[in-house]
């Protein structure tokens, strides 16, 4: 599973970019999960989107704390330590900007940095600072996660032909004008300069918490709090009618439904809040709400 974190500002189309990217990959039979994180919902404020892509269903619903690919849609975010927090060593950084030294000063050790003057291209093609399609084109050049043609098809399907024409030009230029640096190449070019500044400490890998969520699909550990004591009822699975499809687990908002040894998907009552979503989504209606046992 690949994890992607997208950083930008309100009005730059970060969330739309994540949706187009995921749709492009789903069209090729892959599984994706995408969701945004907003601060103040106002143009110009920081916006983050998270995406996961895998060859099997993605059940992880947490934020991408340790992304393999980091996309930055605005140059003003490149000098902020929180942008790089948790970034995996050896990953890929796709950045809007022209000065690779700003990225190097963050203290991270990427395997590849791909930069493009996204603002310039956006203003020349769509007459505004919406860099999302430019950066998607650059992503296609940065790695083989998604192809440029697939991104273009998904963009047309999502935006419609009227908006797609200029954005397709922007995406193509993002691909054509991107500059690719590997870490070794940059180190050779900048060997006279300090690559990593020790005083920026928030970009380093944070220590892992003590507890691990039992339902997590990743190897990362998260601090979790048992929430099962909040219930006054509980979902109960009738195994006689269960077809073991896993739809209940897919829709569970806190990911506390996991298969047992026989493949039946059962809730973990230490964490289940009895929201009832699994009851509503079960195609065979074999999950029912029962009074909580005291």
Image: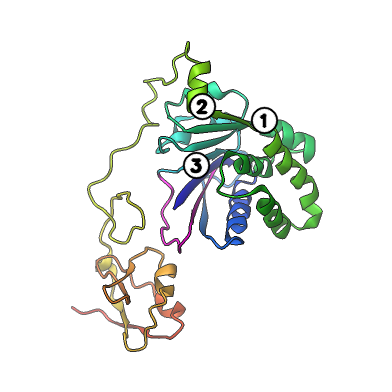
SS for tag 3? strand
**Label located before the other in sequence (2 or 3):** 3
Spot occupied by residue 35 in the image (x, y as percentages of width and height): 52, 55
User: Residue 18, position in %: x, y?
Assistant: 58, 51
**Residue 12 screen position, x and y as percent:** 65, 42
> Is residue 160 shown above or below 76?
below
Q: Mark 2 points at which residue?
A: 103
Marks 2/3: CA–CA distance: 14 Å
Q: Does the rendering let one see residue 36?
A: yes
At x 27%, y 69%, the residue is: 268
Q: Few, some or many C-alpha atoms within 10 Å of disc 2 (few <14, some 14-19, many ≥20)?
A: many
Residue at image position (75%, 35%) is 123
Between the C-alphas of marks 2 and 1, the distance is 14 Å
Q: In the picture shown, does residue 224 fall above or below 207? A: below
Q: What stretch is highlighted in magenta?
A: 45-65
Residue located farthest toward the left when viewing the structure as drawn:
294
Disc marking residue 117: 1
113 lies left or right of 245? right
């Amino acid at each position: 599973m690949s994890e992607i974190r997208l950083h930008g500002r309100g009005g730059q189309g970060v969330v739309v970019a994540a949706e187009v990217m995921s749709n492009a990959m789903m069209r090729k039979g892959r599984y994706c999960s995408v969701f945004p994180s907003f601060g103040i919902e106002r143009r110009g404020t920081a916006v983050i989107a998270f995406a996961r892509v895998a060859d099997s269903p993605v059940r992880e619903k947490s934020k991408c704390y340790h992304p393999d690919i980091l996309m930055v849609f605005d140059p003003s975010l490149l000098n902020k330590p929180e942008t790089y927090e948790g970034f995996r060593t050896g990953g890929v950084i796709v950045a809007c900007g022209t000065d690779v030294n700003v990225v190097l000063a963050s203290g991270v050790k990427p395997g590849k940095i791909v930069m493009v003057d996204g603002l310039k291209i956006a203003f020349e093609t769509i007459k505004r600072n919406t860099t999302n399609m430019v950066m998607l084109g650059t992503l296609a050049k940065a790695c083989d996660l998604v192809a440029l043609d697939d991104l273009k098809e998904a963009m047309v399907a999502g935006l419609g032909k009227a908006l797609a024409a200029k954005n397709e030009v922007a995406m193509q230029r993002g691909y054509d004008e991107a500059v690719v640096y590997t870490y070794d190449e940059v180190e050779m070019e900048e060997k006279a300069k300090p690559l990593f500044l020790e005083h920026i400490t928030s970009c380093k890998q944070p220590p892992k918490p003590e507890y691990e969520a039992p339902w997590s699909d990743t190897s990362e550990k998260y601090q979790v709090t048992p929430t099962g004591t909040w219930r006054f009822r509980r979902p109960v699975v009738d195994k006689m009618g269960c077809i073991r499809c896993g739809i209940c687990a897919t829709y569970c908002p806190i990911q506390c439904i996991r298969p047992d040894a026989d493949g039946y998907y059962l809730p973990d009552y230490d964490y289940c809040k009895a929201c009832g979503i699994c009851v509503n989504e079960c195609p065979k209606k074999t999950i029912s709400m029962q009074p909580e046992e005291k």
